[in-house]
Amino acid sequence: MLKELDCRGLACPAPVLQTKQVLEKENPDVINVIVDNEAARQNVTRFLEHQKFLVSVEKLGSDFHVSGQRTGEATAPEKKAEEPDTAQKKIMVMVATDSMGRGDDELGAKLMVNFLKTLKEMGHELWRLVFVNNGVKMTVEGSDVLPVLKDLEGDGVHILVCGTCLNHFNLLEKKKVGETTNMLDIVTAMQLADSVINI
């Protein structure tokens, strides 16, 4: 059974949520989701892959046709494979700004760099680093903290970067670290984390 889903004009996380809803209610073997922006293309593609679909993408004009064919048993949307190990505490840090504190912006930027450098001291408990709003600016080319973030990613920290935020600032093509994500992934990570620190 083929299911067509038109998600053009929808902001994150609507395309992923509508795709999830169709998979849960109709359980199609083949689905074609039409989206009109790169962030939605990446998010729907990743979601379908986690649901064990073989995914292909075709660009037609300004639209992306994300086609998925089921290859195995679907996993639960919360991605059971990523559930935290109960023996190890999992901390998620949500970064919504590129400056720490209020007052002097130059000082705030220096404090943020120092904060991110010091996160390594959390060791293996640092599980997810999520960038939203102005925080996404630290994940793009030219950012002073890119080497720090790449080191953290190399150490196994999963970095999520809000696709809607990148689109808002016209930075999607300039992202150099982390995985472009959506609010469904962020909320799911919050549920799975033992604690969430907001900056």
Image (tube, grey):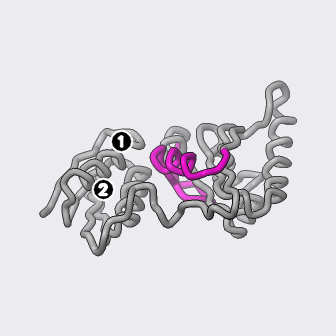
Residue linked to disc 2: 64
The magenta span reads 170-195
In the image: residue 197, left or right of residue 169: right
| Image disc number at residue 14 | 1
Q: Residue furthest bottom?
A: 71
**Label 2 element class:** strand
Whole-Å distance between the Cαs marked 1 and 2?
A: 15 Å
* Foreground of the two, 101 or 64: 101
Q: Percent x, y for residue 147?
A: 76, 61
**Label 1 element class:** helix
In the image: residue 193, left or right of residue 117: left
Residue 192 magenta: yes
In the image: residue 87, left or right of residue 28: right
Q: Percent x, y for residue 96?
A: 65, 38
Seen at 41% across and 43% down, the residue is 13
| Residue 62 seen in render | no
Seen at 41% across and 42% down, the residue is 12
Residue type at the position of mark 1: Ala
